[in-house]
Image: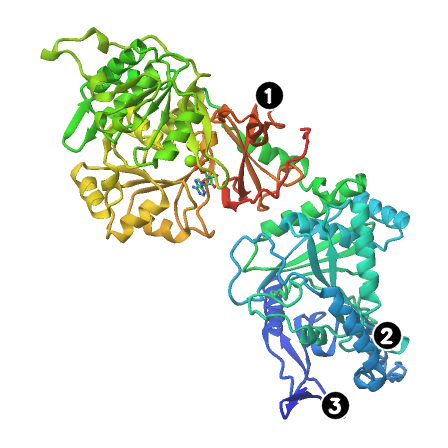
Amino acid sequence: FYAAGGEPSSRIAAQGSVPLAVTDLTALSSSEGEEAAARAAREEEQTPFDLANGPLFRARLLRLAGDEHVFVMANHHIVSDAWSAGILFRELGALYGAFANGRPSPLPPLPVQYGDFAEWQRGADHAEALSRQLSYWKARLEGAPAVLDLPTDRPRPAVQGFGGRRESASFSESTTAALSAFGQSEGLTLFMTLLAGFTALLSRFTGAADVVVGSPIAGRTRPELEGLIGCFLNTLVLRTDVSGDPSFRELARRVREASLGAFSHQDLPFEKLVEELNPDRSLSHSPLFQVMFMLQNAPKSDLEMEGLEVESVPFALSTSKFDLTVSLSPAGGRLGARAEYDVDLFEGETIARWLRHFEALLESALRDPDAPISTLRLLTREEERRVVIDWNRTEAPLPVEGPLPRMFEAQAAETPEAIAAVFEDEQWTYAELNARANRIARRLQEAGLSSGSLVAICLDRSLAMVASLLGILKAGASYLPLDPDYPRERIDFMIADAPVSGLLTSRVLAGRFENLAMPVLLAEDAIAGPAGGAQDPATGNLPDGSGLDDRAYLIYTSGSTGRPKGVEIPHRALANLIGSMRTKPGLSRDDVLLSVTTLSFDIAALELYLPLVTGARLVLVSREIASDASRLLERIARFGVTAMQATPATWLLLLHGGWQGGAPERIFCGGEALSRDLASELQGRCRELWNFYGPTETTIWSAIHPVRGKIESASVPIGRPIANTRMYVLDPGGHPAPVGIPGELFIGGAGVALGYWNRPELTAEKFVPDPFAGDGGRLYRTGDLARYRADGTLEFLGRLDGQVKLRGFRIEL
Ligand code: AMP
Ligand code: MG
């Protein structure tokens, strides 16, 4: 096959001969010999053919012993296909037997040659049929998705690599039998039933409602062609509409229609179709489809040679033409499944899992063919137990002394003289902070603000702010943070919307709260003790003001749409978070944590309380300093800061501000996805890097991840749930999604909020019964898309747009 004037042409040699090189390996041990043979086969696989000059196949004979040989033959696909291999074996066997016995070739002359076929295919008679077929395909593939977005293990490279490996599996006899039985009763071929299952699987993996796969077809549509060696193979593009969550029975009907249509328009060569459709070409993926599916039901013919014992030596090609090729073949009452996959995209482990999911889905579909495909099971019981139970074994006795004030008081009793909190040139010991918080608590109680009250707090960042928060909680009340920098309307809205019964603010800020019909306390006054430093009885600890089930704070989240909603967080959830984080990542008494986050962002609570229950030192900075990299860096150095929590945006600010690292040496990052790039920048500048993940509705952070080593995924994993927290990745049918497959993240356990204040409908929609715990607990549906990695850590993939719906479901375990 050569180029003549830029056009491909062919010429047929009058006669050809292909040398059979013989390599003597008899000197090697038998295992060395086998290795050498495998190497030779690999060499043949990787040596290109000279298409213009031929030969287009090569053969080698490796002599392992006087009576043991390996015969290696490689041919270019341009002159052969899978069907041809069977013919080649048959004819090779016949010729060997004849020639070995000195007889002439027993093969009859061929009625037609490949060249005749090529001519016919290009001839005028055929042209019209092809143009009719082309119109069929154009209509059929109109608007088809260009890429099937499989959840890959690694991002797709810009240029497809074609390196491949294989995984295989074998379906059980019962699945195999059920497939045939279903096909018979529904009038489907085995191919159609399997393709329906495979299409359902791909749709479940990708969420796609329009699934396109390729499938090879023998292309020997006339009897004269059946005995020819040559490339007749064609590829059909099978597009199935999976919209409307059909049942398996309905999907199989759609697949049958699509397949029958495709089969009756199978003559148009795939290459021609691509040329005509001219899709946007990309080097990163193959055109029209990226996943191939096939059923090999032609009986496999073995090579037989007279006087020899012949067996085939397994040899796996190291290439993959597509992202994934799944081929099934019946063998002894069972179906064998083989998958060839692109090694740039997938791990073998993933593909092996997919083959298991394929069988599980078929089993589930055949058991109940009228169930919507979104409800079919993908996981085996064992896999389901792993994701639902084993990866959620986070039960730990609440490692706390009681509600947060008790935790702090215990710490203050242990390290009264240690510095608890620092703000610019002011610093308070644990004993001082506790005394001031107690005094504020009593003042609040005197003003009628105690158990059950909600106290709005509007203060600039300061030590008084910290004492006020503790004071409110000690009084048995809960707090509503109001950021002094918020626009007036926003503050007014929150005060009107929430059940506020009092306000704690400062002299400078009080001006904006005139005419408020509730007690307003000024922090300066509440904190002030008797003159002369006399021991004030008002500074002793108070009796418990609230229980673990009472509200600790109410905080507004903006949400992407609609009016802000108030999330009510109980003491149990707050204590659980602080208790869990005290264990991991933990703080030591030598740690100095810098708090930069505004109080109206729930994560501020971690920064304020974690140091105060561990004996560490809390350093606060004002909002102006927190948003100015160079001044922030100066404070980090001045106060000997060792740890800091901030969003990726703030860490970027520091990097842009020329931060070289060193301090803080412990980095807690959270609130948005931590990109691989930012993470590696940070890794190079600190001793310890953590990714924290969590919605406000499940109390600040629900999952944490220590970032170590090289990061493979585009963003850093969000890790595993904290103590007494369970996470589920559920597919649209409400089933636990398999490892690697995206689903919506649901969170249950101790961190789940009481709900949204005064929004019963929204609360019912977002806080749903936990079907896995069976203890009446609730799950918060995060609206986040996530998936498990094989080691049980979670990856965050983005936000959902509400297209995923939770149906009523119950999983039996
Ligand atoms: P909020 O309720 O305002 O705290 O926002 C919570 C949302 O922020 C989560 O549902 C996620 O979408 C996102 N989020 C928080 N932390 C992370 C993280 N570490 N990685 C990715 N997204 C995060
Ligand atoms: Mg949050």
CA gap, disc 3 to disc 2?
21 Å
Up-down: is 730 above or below 58? above
Up-down: is 77 above or below 437? below
* 519 or 21, nearer to the observer: 519
Label 2 crowd bin: few (<14), some (14–19), many (20+), radius 10 Å? some
Asked whether, in this view, residue 73 is left or right of residue 305, the answer is left
Q: Looking at the picture, which amino acid does disc 3 mark?
A: Ile
Q: Position of residue 318 (x, y in %)?
A: 60, 65
Q: Which residue is mark 3?
A: 12
Residue at image location 33% in from the left, 40% down from the top: 646
Residue at image location 23% in from the left, 36% down from the top: 622
Q: Position of residue 535 (x, y in %)?
A: 15, 8
Ligand 1 is within 8 Å of the C-beta of the residue at disc 3: no
Instruction: Label 2, secondary structure: give it.
Output: loop
User: What colour scheme does the image use?
Assistant: rainbow
Task: Check residue 776 in the rendering and tell me which mark sits there, or answer none.
Answer: 1
* 769 or 446, nearer to the observer: 446
Up-down: is 724 above or below 437? below
Ligand 1 is within 8 Å of the C-beta of the residue at disc 1: no
Instruction: Label 3, secondary structure: give it.
Output: loop
Q: Which residue is mark 2?
A: 226
Dividing the picture into quarters, in which one does residue 612 lie? Answer: top left
Q: Looking at the picture, which amino acid does disc 1 mark?
A: Gly
Identity of the residue furthest to the front in this view:
515
CA gap, disc 3 to disc 1?
78 Å
Task: Check residue 564 in the rendering and tell me which mark sits there, or answer none.
Answer: none
Q: For ligand 1, which image quadrant applies?
A: top left
- Quadrant location of the N terminus in the rendered image: bottom right
Residue 565 visible: yes
Label 1 crowd bin: few (<14), some (14–19), many (20+), radius 10 Å? few
Image label count: 3
